[in-house]
Amino acid sequence: MEPAEFIQHSGGAIGVAWLMIAFPLVGAAILLLGGRRTDRFGHLVGVVMAVASFVVAALAFVQLLGFQPGERRRLIPLYDFIPGMAKVGLLVDPLSISFCLLITFVGSLIHVYSIGYMAHDPNRRRFFAYLNLFVAAMLLLVLADNYVALFVGWEGVGLASYLLIGFWQHKPSAATAAKKAFIVNRVGDFGLLIGIFTIFATFHSLAFAQVFPAAHGASQGTLTAIGLLLLVGACGKSAQLPLQSWLLDAMEGPTPVSALIHAATMVTAGVYLIVRSGAVFQGAETAQLVVTIVGVATLLAGAIIGTAKDDIKKALAGSTMSQIGYMVLAAGIGPAGYAFAIAHLITHGFFKADLFLGAGSVMHGMNDEVDMRKYGGLRKVMPITFVTFLIGYLAIIGFPLLSGYFTKDGIIETAMEHNAVLGWLAVIGAGVTGFYMSRLVFMTFFGAKRWEATAHPHESPAVMTWPLIILSLGAIGLGAFLIVGNRFMTFLAPAVGAPEELPTFNPFSLTGLVTLALVAAGAAFAWFRYGAAEVPAVAPRGSFLTTFARRDLYGDALNEALFMRPGQWLTRLAVFFDNRGVDGLVNGLAAGIGGSSGRLRRIQTGFVRSYALSIFVGAALLAGAWLVVGNL
Amino acid sequence: MPWLSTLMGVSVLGALGVTLVRNDKLAKQFTLVVSLIVLALTVAMAVQFSPNGDKFQFAETYDWIPAFGVHYGVAVDGIALVLILLSVILVPIVVLASWHDAEKGKRSVRTYFSLLLVLEAMMIGVFAATDVFLFYVFFEAMLIPMYFMIGSYGGAQRSYAAVKFLLYSLFGGLLMLVAVIALYSIAGKGTFMFSDLVGTVQDVTTQKWLFLGFFIAFAIKAPLWPFHTWLPDAAAQAPAGAAVLLVGVLDKVGTYGMLRFCLELFPDAAKFFTPLVITLSVIGIVYGAIVAIGQTDMKRLIAYTSVSHFGFIAMGVFAMTTDAGAGATLYMVNHGFSTGALFLIAGFLIHRRGSQFISDYGGVQKVAPILAGTFLVAGLSSLSLPGLSTFVSEFMVLTGTYQRYVVPSVIAATGVILAAIYILWMYQRTMNGPTAESVKSLPDLNAREKWVVAPLIALLLVFGFYPKPLLDVIHPAVKDTLSSVSVTDPGAAVPVAKEGQ
Amino acid sequence: MTTHYLVLSALLFAIGGVGVLVRRNAIVVFMCVELMLNACNLAFVTFARQNGNLDGQVIAFFVMIVAAAEVVIGLAIIVTIFRTRRSASVDDASLLKY
């Protein structure tokens, strides 16, 4: 099934889709410009704006459902942004509206949660301002109808991410992590930018509605180049190999930020970009192959990192990397995988936000302790957090009939059909997921109490637990809702296309059973190591492999050796060259002129008789010269 | 109404008036009022400009030295108009920002503000001049007020910096003078009027020599790598306000000159030298950024970022596509606002603490959040964050260049990454982390300073989302320039369906 | 016929020139300058005679007037220098240098 035509639209909730972006943007403006005056009610403004945005998204969704499937790609032109290059408009279609609903719904819940989580922070207003800014930028990213506006949103979420990771910027580690995230993302943006340049040079347009229908006309080489360049951008934003290193450090930010930006929404922007640009990728098999390889490599790397981390947030961050790896893998497969990629993205948005917020709730009760070796036995003191966390956990490992079971299994089955090697690697990844997530749950909620003396764990207030409950409901039912009967694939087809033959869901396929068995084995192994056995308070040294995983597969060491040190060396060399070389030449020239004139002035001796002599000699020379020339 | 002469006249009269006022405070207020009047008049003029009308509008031409065909000729096209707008917007902001800057030394406060207004008149003149000789006169005369502003009111090494700035610029200017006179005699038209001289030099070898005479002057002014080393010294020693005008406007005369004179007067030579200029620009972009990363002095760092940015502008000018040319022109304007904001806010910070060294700061965000926030916005504009106007221009320059020169624009695009490093690292070292002892009692921005920063940030934001008003004015002028060089934009490899089909 | 006068003029000029270059005493230097001037005068008058017009003679008068004015100012300077420095050597008055 081919994607539908683009249709100009006006009127209704879709016609005012820009309000989705405007609400949180206005919220951010009020909170940032209002300053301390808005401290008292700032968090409420933030929540109201996010919810308002969700209402618009929901209404637009309802209106979109009212159209025939073939008429569900609606373009809303806004204004001429860069004359001759890009007119900005919004594209409301099944793909973008799915994202809008996810962003605004999960975003609103996390806004509510943050009221409680950030209650004691003197800068809570600023936090909400940044959150609102993020929501606005993310919505612009997914609603944009051209690559420039998408890039504006793309960088906007990067900025919000920078501000929020470094929210506690008095901590040097947070400030450094924020800077690192921005710079690594910029490396990705560099690729994306070149990709956009290539698109413009090829098509002289950046609008989706013009580029995609014409994409098949471009040469294979051009499309491959564009695809690979877009992939570089996607790798940066979605923390895929080799640009993954910033995500683990990004956990320095407050936990709601990790939940919203670094788990549920922003990091999935890369998947969005690949799926959105499907028309380009489908013309470039090499690019697609690279996408799937990157996806598989990252899903394994993330899972391995997740197994070794004692920091609860970093373990979850590894898991995020891994899950996005699944989505990228599916997105690389083509129309057969798109629906699963986005479906997994949505369910992951729910259960990962649930897990992160749960972790935040735990930290909230444990004096912001993140080391799981100092948790243990928390299920009794934090019952709601425990139950919701447990649901999220079961969803992510693919426990039958919960959300992750349907969406992840869909990806694995599709990958298996596409390429058996990739498929089996994805299965192994699922097994590792079963292990590290179980390890996390056992270390945190089961076993003996290993709390610090000062810790007095308690259940979080209702404003924090209700979002958890709602998210865990999504983690339970959303997967089945989307996948069974190919509901989501059919819905998404007008935007991204769908395979001619829709897949049928088979709960007893070989792949599915093997996956389940591996997950169960992983969970059992985790129980044996961390549930039944004593967890040492200090991490044992572990084997070479453990260290390998703990050090993030030496990603940072590699970056440092390859880029940072040579970079510092180059910078010093350049500064030296500039001061001594270029400026030295300029100053040397000046000094040379000054020096020679200093020497020449010595001729001015002050002795009248020597002046007289030079006059005589000069006169004699002139006379002589005249005589010679005159006689010629 | 002779708009342009009025603008210059008001500034010059204002400058004279300031010297007559006895009271320093009154003199400052008077300067501010004069600069605001000039701004209002310029806006009134700009509104009447019709983008698709004549190329040069508001033209005035009077004989000056009839014996040599020298005229007092002024007029504006879209390119000159936006640059004049940039100048007159920056002047009142700089006046307000330098309120106390001239008071530290022993020199007269009134003279400083008088010099500012003289400089304003000359900045308007240099962009508006349609007579090549008049342009040269303004080009050189601008050095005088700036020389005194740096030399009399600058930092510890002010006289070194001022002399270096003056001699370096003068050297370039004299090369240009030779080329101007040669152009006059070779053209044999008996006039210095720009429009009469266009297309008169046909011989390619002659064009090349004359091109070099003009180009070296502009490359020093801009400054292009490797003629840049006077800028960090001058900018670091100049008082913040003067640095803004120096980097924000005066240096633009260089890139403006490349676009107006080098391209239109010597089209064949320009095409011949394009590979060289693009190479220098790309080197400048990367080199400037790398050296900026290694700086320890805030103002020198900002100056080196400008070296990088000027590389983008020169590259856009010589890429000779409409997008790149319009982008480069827009870049000149945006860079003025962006660097202006950076220099001024850094100036506020330095004024408070009394040190330009980055290592003397730390954790300022905690004690002065507004200062830190505005500094961050200014910094983000320097790294061309989308949503701020600098992004639009950088994007246009790179996209426009990419259509013709793929490799240079890809290398130049690495500037995007390097910019993030130098800005964010500086921000982290000054604003983040634990608050340093020495800045514990640092006051936040006061009302005057907020009024300085607010218009700049507002302009960056507005033109970041809606650059159309500026581009509508710039586009026809750039197209006209490129058509006189007789180049056409490369077409699309794959045609797309037109809009609305 | 006038050659002898010109040779004499040249000789006198050369003697004066050498005197200016080698003598240290300001008064002697001064007199040598006068000698050179008068050598010039002789040449002028000779040329006037040779060409049969009065131009050379007129110039000679100008030279004499200039020489008179020069003597007045020059001697005054020399006397002042001698008063302050107790020396009339031109080599001692070498402060105006570099």
Image (cartoon, coloured by chain):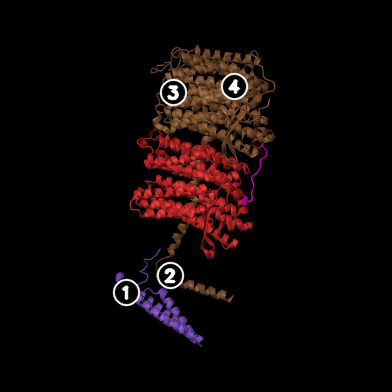
Main SS, magenta residues: loop
The colour assigned to chain A within the rendered structure? brown
In the rendered picture of this protein, how many numbered marks are placed on residues? 4
- Badge 3 is on which residue? A115
Mark 2 highlights which residue? Answer: A611
Quarter of the image that includes the C terminus of chain B:
top right
Residues at discs 2 and 3 in contact (Cβ within 8 Å): no
Chain letter of mark 3 equals A
Residue A277 locus on image (x, y percent): 62, 30
Q: Is residue A379 left or right of residue A632?
A: left
Stretch of the chain drawn in magenta: B483-497
Comes first in the chain, label 3 or label 4: 3
Identify which residue, B499 or A374, lies in the foreground: B499
Compare residues B68 and A425 and report the one nearer the observer: B68
Q: Which residue is mark 1?
A: C79
Residue for badge 4:
A343
Query: Residue A622, how many percent across, how many down?
Result: 51, 73
SS label for mark 1: helix
